[in-house]
Every structure is written in structure tokens, then in C-alpha cells.
Image (cartoon, rainbow, N blue to C red):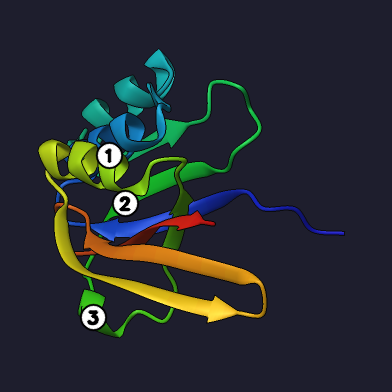
Amino acid sequence: MASLGNITFASKDPRSLAEFWAEALEYDLEEPPPEIIEAIEAEGGDLNAVAAAVDPTEDGPRLFFKKMPRSSPEHIPIHLDLDAEDREEEVERLAELGASVVETKTGTTGPVTETWTVMRDPEGNGFCVQSFH
């Protein structure tokens, strides 16, 4: 059976985007081992070509950011949903980190009402902050 290894983002600035998501999710930046840094430098590579953010509890997925051509973020059919006890407070915190608010929506299915705010990270990737009540 397969398991989730990474959620990978194409990025213009992998380190900067990894820093945003590390702050957003209270993750740690994963520093490459010295031998990897040495190999990249020896090959004349870009030390900012990749970056990663990891869950310090090791429960959440590793987020991997790689410098590569990007498609339009408006047409990516997948995004992250963040759960928050206080959605409005979390949206404000993420906006202070560099995210932007697109819109807030509410929907009801049976007894569950969900409110979510659609946001974009600093490179325009969409994600939602949601709360249930």
C-alpha cells in the first residue's frame, strides 16, 4: 500500500514559500543535509531550487517546494483546506504572513454549516480556511 510522501508545489521562490507555509502551519523548515548542500554547490546549482516544511510532530505531510515552471494557480484542481477554531482570527494571521483573501462562503449540508475563506498564498496558490458549526 502506498503512503503520502510529499505535497509538492511548483514555485518561483521555494525557500520563501516554504517559510510562509512553515509559519502558517507551525511547521519547521527542513534544512538539507550538509552533503546535499555541498553537492549542489559543487555542481553550480541553485541552493534555493528546493525547500521543505515538515510537521514537528511528524503527523502531517511534508510540504516540498521546487523551482519549476508553474501553471496558472487559478486552474489547479487541488488545494489545501486548513481547519481553524477561530476562522476569522486565522485568516487575519495568514494575511499578516502574506496571504490574500479572495472571498468567504457559507454552505449547509443537513445539520452541518460550514464557513470557509478562500485565500491565496504569496505565490497565488489557492487554499481555504474553514470552520464548522
Q: Quadrant of the C terminus?
A: bottom right
Residue at mark 1: 89
Precedes in sequence: disc 1 or disc 2: 2
Q: Which residue is mark 3?
A: 74
Residue contact at pointers 1 and 2, CB within 8 angstroms: no
Q: Is residue 32 above or below residue 6?
A: above
**How many neighbours does mark 3 have within 10 angstroms: few (below 14), some (14-19), or many (20 or more)?**
few
Q: Residues within 10 Å of mark 2 (few under 14, many from 20)?
A: many
Which residue is located at x 21 percent, y 36 percent? 93
Place residue 19 in its image quadrant.
top left
Looking at the image, which is closer to me, 82 or 72?
82
- Residue pushed farthest bottom? 75
118 or 73: which is nearer to us?
118
Residue that lies at the very extreme toward the front in this rendered image: 111
Callout 1 crowding tier (Cα within 10 Å): few <14, some 14–19, many ≥20 = few
In this rendering, which labeled residue sits more in front, label 1 or label 2?
1
Considering only order in the chain, which callout, 2 or 3, is on the residue closer to the N terminus? 2
Q: Nearer the viewer, mark 3 or mark 1?
A: 1
Q: Amino acid at mark 1?
A: Glu
User: Which residue type does callout 2 highlight?
Assistant: Lys
Identify the mark nearer the N-term, 3 or 1: 3
Quadrant in the rendering for residue 123: bottom left
State the mark number for residue 66. 2
